[in-house]
Image (spheres, helix red, strand yellow):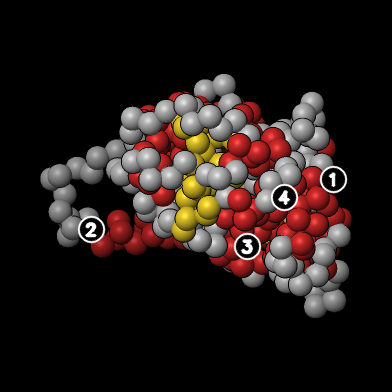
Amino acid sequence: MERDSRLGPGSYPRWGRFQRRARLGLAIGTMLALVSACAPAPAGPGAAPSQLASAAAPGPGVAPAPEQVTFSLDYILYGGHAPYFLAQERGYFAERGLDVNIVEGKGSASTAQVVGAGSAQLGQIDGSVVIRSVAQDIPIKAVAGLIQKSPISAIVGKTSGISGPRDLQGKRIGAPPASGGTVLFPAWLKMNGVDPESVQVISVGPETLTTTLLLGQVDGIVAFDENVIKINAAGGDVFAIHYADYGLNLPSTTVAANTAFLREKPDVVRRFVAAVLKGWADAAPDPRGAVDVLMKSAPPTLKAESETLILANLMTLLHSKRTEGQRLGWMAGEDWEEAVNILAEQGDLATKPAVADLLTNEFVSAN
């Protein structure tokens, strides 16, 4: 009720003010006495911990605070990260009691270090990096496999006459120095009966790799298959020969967790994996919808059209031959065992980690 504007601060008689204060004090005193009479006796110094905890516990209608989780991506934002943002926007994390902070990464090896140190509880990490990291005693483990057919490829022109690795004999192949595909290229050729010395490998930096093929300076390049999209958008007419289709497959994108976090909060990991897999399942039939959500957080240099094509291509790589027919995220131990052997043969591993130390399907199977 609005105060009468005619009465200023000094308009009340002193006795009236005293009466009002007296009546107010009496009323407050009576209320405090009633509350004290109804309240239980305070817990003494020897009160049991359960008594103290129950006194501090939230009431029956109070929801527990969401679990804080930091999830590190493997690199700066691109189309392949859209399913995580889709899961977040649609409330899949929140409805499972999770408050997830998605942060950019600086490469899979860096993300492995961040997750291993516990600065992020979970991260998107390449499967081959998980293997190398565990071999170096970095405490991480894959809890879901997302891209299980390796995108590493030899990219060639459709009119080049090259249809498989045997056709690469006598050809010029551009390859970025020290990239995973370049390191594995000789082993892949040998697996397919091709003498590596019969193929001319030309070292080309990643910034000019696609241009050399467009200009006809090489007959093919070693690169991830998503470069097909970029080259054809620039006027090329190329396709990818996947290493995985010719005997050499390394697990690619995984969700990996810090092993201490995995032991201490398995239920949080289960809920996180469930939300992520739902995001990926939603994105598969509608990659553009997922990318539109990503674009709300992406820099202006990212273009929705090209990122949609990249995500759509990744959706064709969700399964290896051994995981076909299995639920999304399930990993085949044989794929990882083969990958360990391949990396060991290349001299990449100090020790050969056991498959059980590399991955678990427990959290995929629980969803």
Residue on which the image places disc 3: 112
Residue on which the image places disc 1: 334
Circle 1/circle 4 CB separation < 8 Å: no
Q: Is residue 97 left or right of residue 8?
A: right
Q: Note whether 243 is above or below 208 in the view shown.
A: above
Residue at x 77% of width, y 62% of height = 345
Query: In the rendering, at what x and y percent does residue 126 appear?
Result: 63, 52
- The amino acid sitting under disc 1 is Glu
Which residue is most to the bottom? 45
Residue on which the image places disc 4: 190
Q: Earlier in the sequence, mark 3 or mark 4?
A: 3
Which mark's residue is nearer the viewer, 3 or 2? 3
Which residue is most to the left? 6
Residue at x 76% of width, y 56% of height = 342
Q: Marks 1 and 4, Cα distance to the nearest angstrom?
A: 21 Å
- The amino acid sitting under disc 2 is Pro
Which mark's residue is nearer the viewer, 3 or 1? 1
